[in-house]
Amino acid sequence: MEESYIWSKIQNYYGETKYNGTPQSIQRDRTIFRKPFKRWYIAPAAMVFQAICGSVYAWSVFNRPIDIAIYGSDMKVSPITFYINIGCLGVAASLLGPWLERNGPRKAGMIGGTLFCIGHWVAALGIYYKSMHVVFIGYGVVSGLGLGLCYISPISALQKWFPERKGFGAGLSVCGFGIGGLICAKIPLPLIDAVGLPLTFVIIGTTYWVILMICAFVFRFPPPERNKTRGPIFRNGTVFITRKQHKHGSANDEKSMPPVMADSKTPPQNRIVYEPAIDLTLREALSTYEYLGMYMMFLANLVSGLVILSRLADMCINVFEKSPDTASTVVAINGGFNFVGRLMFSSLSDVIGRKPSYLVMLGTQVVILAVLPLIFLTKNYWAFLLAIWTLTCAYGGGFGTIPAFIHDLFGMHNISGLHGILLTAWSIAGVGGGILFTLIYNHLIKENGYTPSSPEVYNTNFYWLCACAAIGFVVLLFVRSTVRDRLLPRVGGEVTRLRVFGRILRFEKNGTFKFKIKYLRQEEEEKEWASFWQAKH
């Protein structure tokens, strides 16, 4: 009975989520400083907010100073803090996503920002008293939990404020996180020289808290009337109309609507696409094949970026024999490419689609990870920079595009919950990938006689990272990313199908051990879709 009660509570928590704002709070959110609130106000606040949170990407700058301060030498223990932080980030995001949808982004941003900064202050105590475990608890656990809540706070709000440009809105909300490394990587070392390492964490934490509170004050969900679809969406010469945009009983009732695109000969400016609307509850979305495939694809997209980010400064210093100052510059510039990737790929996905964007990103990662061992063996520094920065661009693009991908596949009402659970992939990639990298790295040094400057300790890890990206690429091919692909039933003998260059590639069984592949023409697909719709209605 007790187990059934707990499961019921979990189902209710992750079920339908609705903002619990009172009429008074909703009315207050219509204005800011007695001026009407406009949706563009939230964009710069979100970018600054996320940039502060993105300072976690500059953690590799602290690795060496913290190890020396606590152990007296570079023991390579400090990078574990980054993995713990990312692990706690995913846990917090997955648990608190539904809570955010019910309580709003302002409250979530303020609570998350406060925890993030408290973690800095606790870490300062750990460094002062030479306790790495306190650093783990402070910056790893406390800051990580706050970071998880901070990360998802502006994303859901901007998705709701920019429904006609979901990719752009998502990219806008997370691109700041990517640039955090660029802004914050050059700050610590001069500050450490001036005031010492413990006080550096106190000053940084306090400054961050003030900025985060100011930004969080701007966050809010749009008023209820903005959540209603106000008409067709025009994009790239095509008008997209969902069933929910038509009133029942009218001449354009959903059952009488043709769910097919106008004839392909119709000029683009006159084309209209009728597609069913997608709006699933959190429980329904979690049970779909698409969500599982999206999770695996997202995990594959993240693992290489996270592992390399946490070791980037060490790679520059040990393998390519650069100074710590140069390494911090590389980390800072790398943050800029993280920023560019988030905004570029998310905006690109509004044009070419979410799935093609991810195919480009994962394909790029596979190629780069395959050639990185050769670059390390030859110690070609400029090729290394080009490869790493391109890899980071693809890594950042994954974060920028995923909220819009969720919105497209499962609807707008549970973005925070679904996105939060998906971010556990971030935790697995950060913790699991980091631990595996470290185990292989330490084994090669202790058992095989390599040194931290040997390319082999990194190259062995690049092989399994490349395999992960390749698996993600293959899984993504079978994710049905459009409403039509998800609803169109299989024909007789069909085993599976995927869409290539806009057309369906169908794998059919033709005998006991015989298979054939059929590449459907556009006209054939439209005919099947129209037949399905007429039979259904």
Image (cartoon, grey):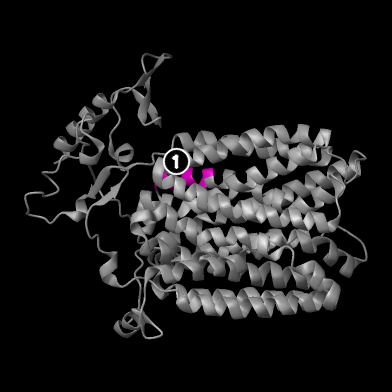
- Name the element at disc 1: helix
Evaluate whether residue 1 shows in this view: no
Query: Which residue is denoted by mark 1 in the rendering?
Result: 355
Q: Provide residue 56's location: percent of width, then percent of height.
A: 67, 63
Q: Is residue 450 left or right of residue 124?
A: right
Q: In the rendered structure, which segment of residues is drawn in magenta?
A: 288-297
Q: In front: 21, or 43? A: 43
Q: Majority secondary structure of the magenta segment?
A: helix
What is the quadrant of residue 493 in the picture?
top left
Residue pictured at 85% horizontal, 44% vertical:
319
Q: Is residue 350 left or right of residue 256?
A: right
Tell me the quarter of the image containing the C terminus. Answer: top left
Q: Provide residue 274's location: percent of width, then percent of height.
A: 22, 43
Q: In front: 133, or 37? A: 37
Tell me the quarter of the image containing the N terminus. Answer: bottom left
Q: Provide residue 285's location: percent of width, then percent of height.
A: 38, 52
Q: Please check the rendered image and state whether residue 291 is part of the magenta-colored stretch, yes or no.
A: yes
What is the quadrant of residue 480 in the picture?
top left
Amino acid at circle 1: Lys
Alpha-carbon neighbours of circle 1 within 10 Å: few (<14), some, or many (≥20)?
many
Q: Provide residue 6's location: percent of width, then percent of height.
A: 45, 67
**In this view, 254 is above or below 187:** above
Evaluate whether residue 270 shows in this view: yes
What is the quadrant of residue 129 in the picture?
bottom right
**In this view, 328 is above or below 517:** below
Residue pictured at 56% horizontal, 69% vertical:
48
**In this view, 227 is above or below 371:** below
Residue pictured at 43% horizontal, 39% vertical:
479
Q: Is residue 412 left or right of residue 424?
A: left
**In this view, 537 is above or below 162:** above
Q: Please check the rendered image and state whether residue 186 is part of the magenta-colored stretch, yes or no.
A: no
Q: Is residue 174 left or right of residue 60?
A: left
